[in-house]
Image (spheres, rainbow, N blue to C red):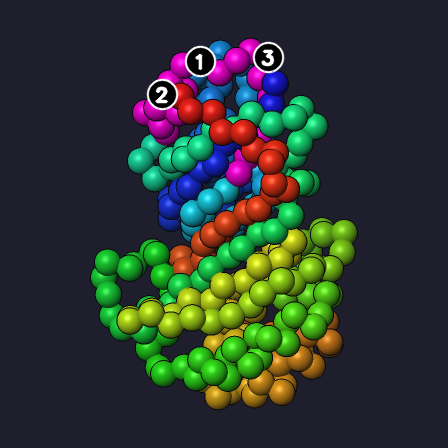
Amino acid sequence: MRYFLQIAYRGTAYHGWQVQHNAVGVQAVIDDCLTRQLGEEIHSIGCCRTDTGVHAKKLFMHFDLEKELPPNFKFKINSFLPKDIVVQGVYKVPHNFSARKDAVKRTYRYYISQEKNPFLIGLAGFVWEPLDIDKMNEAAKQLLQYHDFETFSKANSQTEHHLCDMYSAEWHKTDSQIYFEISANRFLRGMVRMIVGTLIQVGRGNLTADEFAPLIEKKNRHDAGAAVPAEGLYLWDVLYPEGVLEEIIN
């Protein structure tokens, strides 16, 4: 049987999602708790990877199990997990349904505080000077016209290609913060943080909205702005085809 878990975590203490040999990733912590609770060696697959320090409001993972989940599984697994990781939902899915391959849309948000706030340390990026949100949105709209985003891909990422179907990209403003929300079928390693860093240059007036599109066309990482810190980035939502996820209440 195959199960999906919907999880959320604060990524500050972890070296990203992926299992690593010399550092602690969120996946390794969850797999260890599942193995101890279920009595079977669990090796999960996540819907995507997050980098060191990146947070997840909603991330899905799947794992296979030879037996039914025990009663009160969600309560029990949450009691095993550290306080910065939580299982929010448990689903039974077809045996060939994949958390990674069958996701149809992924959404990220990047939060920026524009005033000093000690309670947002580790949870938001900080930019003190004024930013022109209208110009940043003018530039961000141009992302929807492209599919090849090599400009915003980390070097030596070993990806097969740099193609992404972009669905939306827009800046929003709250009372004391701004945030950038972007949705696509897939993202390249480091892509969102590099896009945000480049759009901030537009907001500062160091780059015009008309100069933003040529950067994408050049496919040269060195032409893009510096990646913003990981602490402001959240995996916000992941969508799958309707009717597949059957939630288990226990």
SS label for mark 2: helix
SS label for mark 3: loop
Which residue shows up at 57% across the image and 74% down it? 140
Question: Observer-nearest residue: 159 or 178?
Answer: 178
Query: How far is disc 1 from disc 3 in space, using C-alphas?
Result: 12 Å
Label 1 crowd bin: few (<14), some (14–19), many (20+), radius 10 Å: few
What residue is disc 3 on?
Answer: 66
Say which mark, if any, is on residue 70.
1
Instruction: Give the percent coordinates (x, y) of residue 49.
Output: 56, 45
Query: How far is disc 2 from disc 1 in space, using C-alphas?
Result: 9 Å
Q: Which residues are magenta?
A: 60-81
Q: Amino acid at mark 3?
A: Glu
Asked whether the residues under the numbered discs 2 and 1 touch, taking CB atoms below 8 Å apart as contact, a structural biologist would say yes
For marks 2 and 3, the one nearer the N-term is 3
Which residue shows up at 38% across the image and 72% down it? 173
Q: Amino acid at mark 2?
A: Lys
